[in-house]
Amino acid sequence: MADNLPGVVLVRDTKDRDGGTLHVRPECWRSFVDLARRIGPVG
């Protein structure tokens, strides 16, 4: 996750550095992280 651009969270696959970047609004990213914490690991 990049943190050098205000107002946007950039996410990419660290194993595919030439792949695309997902642009997410910070409030949506926070919601995603909160949900991930609540449901825990899935597998």
Image (spheres, rainbow, N blue to C red):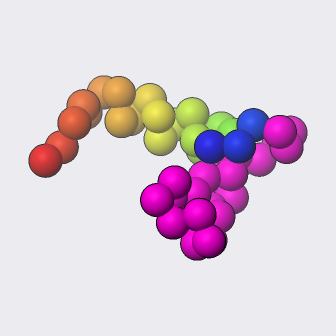
- Left or right: residue 31 versus residue 42 is right
Instruction: Please say whether residue 16 is one of the residues in the magenta stretch.
Output: yes
Q: Which residues are magenta?
A: 4-24
Q: Is residue 37 above or below residue 24?
A: above
- Residue 32 drawn at (x, y percent): 47, 41
- Residue 26 drawn at (x, y percent): 69, 40
- Left or right: residue 7 versus residue 33 is right
**Looking at the image, which residue is at 75% across and 37% down?**
3
Query: From the image, which quarter does the N terminus lie in?
Result: top right
**Looking at the image, which residue is at 47% across and 34% down?**
33
- Residue 38 drawn at (x, y percent): 30, 27
Magenta-drawn stretch, dominant element (helix, strand or loop): loop
Residue furthest left in the image: 43
Instruction: Please say whether residue 12 is one of the residues in the magenta stretch.
Output: yes
Which of 27 and 2 lies nearest the eye of the viewer?
A: 2
Quarter of the image where one finds residue 36: top left
Q: Is residue 15 above or below residue 36?
A: below
Q: Is residue 2 above or below residue 34?
A: below
Q: Is residue 28 above or below residue 30?
A: below
**Looking at the image, which residue is at 68% across and 51% down?**
10
Which of 17 and 11 lies nearest the eye of the viewer?
A: 17
